[in-house]
Amino acid sequence: MKNLFSKLMFVAMAATLFVACEDVPEPYDVPGHGGNVPGPDTEIKGGTGTGTKADPFNAVAALNYGNKLTSGEESPGYMFIKGKVVSVKEEFTTQYGNGTFYISADGKAGNQFYAYRVLYLGNKKFTSSDEQIKVGDEVVICGIITNYNGTIETAQNKGFLYELNGVNRGGDPQENTPGEAKGDGTLANPFNSVAAIAFAQKTGEAESEDVYIKGKVASITEQYGTQYGNATFTISDDGTSNNAFTVYRALYLGNKKYTSGELLREGNDVIICGKVTNFKGNTPETVAGKAYLYSLNGNTENNNDTPDPQPGKGEGKGTADSPYNVIAAMAAASGTGVYVKGFIVGTVTGQTLATGAVFSDAAEAQTNLLIAASANETNVENCMPVQLPSGDIRTALNLVDNKGNYKKEVTLYGNIEKYFGATGIKSVSYAILDGKQIGTNPEGGNDNPSSDVKKVTIAEFNAASESNDVWYELTGTVKNLKEGDQYGNFDLEDATGSVYVYGLLSEKDGAKKLFQELVAAKGIQEGSKITIIGNRGSYNGKIEVMNAYFVSIESQGGSAGDAVKAISIADFIKAEVNDNVWYQLTGVVKNLKEGDLYGNFDLEDSTGSVYVYGVLSEKGGAKKLFQDLVAAKGIKNGSTLTIIGTRGEYKGKIEVMNAYFVSVKN
């Protein structure tokens, strides 16, 4: 009887378990098998969109589209996919510039599309000032869709974040146009990228003999570094993505692992030597570890691969009058409130000095520097890593924004302690570079040469004598600026007159031919009101502002749709709600909470008060970085702040929305 009862109980429990299992959802509600691919003849319901920029796929439609591709096949062109972030597998990093995450139509776990190693907004690499992606973000992805062994995803290096929570920085991809194959793969007549692709496709998944391929660097996926000694990048005839060939994990000059030397930049002229293959039958590329950089901008030898054999001797006492040199500072090993001088020789990327030292101005990290006793040092054992705190020190010294600082001598005041596992410098509060004092002088007084800059009208500038030693600050409106100009040549006009500006740099003694980067960062355009500093010069009898560099932008200017109107707060309050009309407001900061990440406060002038809903460091900039702006500019309650923003409302309350920083007076 007991045996019969036990059997009946077992049957009842089994039935309960089977019923309960019917209520447990699948991990993904995608039918079919393997990866995130639907069954071979299955169409998931709920797909919308056609994959264009105007009508993006949702995640379901992207899966349905990818299901029609054979394994390894790619979409013939770039597609647009929209959705909400479900999970983040790899956050965007400054080391590689890309990120990996899943999206779905509703932000839930079902029917997920895989965004694999996509670049950031604008089809650019992620930088430290960019906003990190997170679960729940609304995004639009632009990329090549592929069926990779059963997973529908963006093809590696062929996708980017087109839109993030409504923010769009452009970067529309170039569609491939047919190119002409050139070369025979010899050193005398290298393949171009079109011929290399065709040769690799003909070779198939086998490895070819060694061939030579030439082109311009179009994109860099993995930069040369001391950890692995190789790099991954693409090359093409014109330096664009059109008909680009992938150079995969190629060694450095001389067929050696990279230890030091010039790093790659987009647009560099290169020749590659090595074996090629058609990886998995769909990716023409060089074979990993069996190709190398034969020449870089015409150089076939690395002139920087021999470290200084004798770093010299220690000098200095660590005082303002007698700073330690790097050798003496390393020997001291520790110390609080000491002075150290050295040459800026690079930065550190990664976790350790031994594997992450980068000896060039092609920096990815804004938060640190490498200094040495010699400007040509490339041996990490003779270098000290320097931590750059946020604020004036980081702004003025970091190599990402100040490439001209490379190989310059700098004096630092801080503490000698361990950093990146080596003897380094932290808590830097004061520095001297090019004779200019940065930060707070512990000895008291900051007698910067910048205090000798004369603020004048354009009429007064034109009347001055020519001199490369006297600096003038001018404020005026940009006129006759040509679209795409790389140098920054234009007329500057104020109420007293006009003068020709012969080139504008982003900073004093900065790199030339980078004016378009300044345009993109600051929004300079025809009609913008800007402040610059430069010398009085002339050419063929024409007065010019020479050696000029950018100080600030007072208003954007531009077309009627982009024009900025400087008005009182009372007039702003009377204006209509409109995200397309921009206003410049100046007032006193009130009710700013300590540690606020967004920049929410009241702005008050003599006519009234208005609530500011967040302030960015620049137009379209990253959110939640207001404390960086506070540290850099000293914004606080009582500061007189100038911002630009649009007129908005929330639950009947008038607000300044989409606001970004212009200037501050404390």
Image (spheres, rainbow, N blue to C red):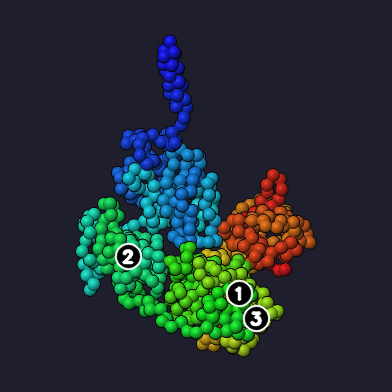
Q: Which residue is mark 3?
A: 448
Q: CA distance from mark 1 to mark 3?
A: 27 Å
- In the rendered image, residue 197, in percent from the top left (x then y), is placed at 27, 59
- The answer to which of marks 1 and 2 sits earlier in the sequence is 2
Between marks 1 and 2 in the image, the one whose residue lies nearer the viewer: 1
Between marks 3 and 2 in the image, the one whose residue lies nearer the viewer: 2
Q: Nearer the viewer, residue 384 or 460?
A: 384
- The answer to which of marks 1 and 3 sits earlier in the sequence is 1
Q: Residues within 10 Å of mark 2 (few under 14, many from 20)?
A: many
Q: Residues within 10 Å of mark 1 (few under 14, many from 20)?
A: some
Res 500 quadrant in image: bottom right
Is the Cβ of the residue at disc 1 closer than 8 Å to that at disc 2?
no
Q: Which residue is mark 1?
A: 335
Q: Decide: is 459 above or below 247.
A: below
Q: Decide: is 188 above or below 48.
A: below
Decide if residue 249 is on the left or right side of residue 55. Answer: left
Mark 1 belongs to which amino acid? Gly
Q: Residues within 10 Å of mark 3 (few under 14, many from 20)?
A: few
**The N terminus - image quarter:** top left
Q: Can residue 313 be seen from the camera position used here?
A: yes
Q: Decide: is 174 above or below 147.
A: below
Q: Residue at x 51, y 74 (%)?
A: 384
Q: Residue at x 32, y 77 (%)?
A: 301
Q: Which residue is mark 2?
A: 250
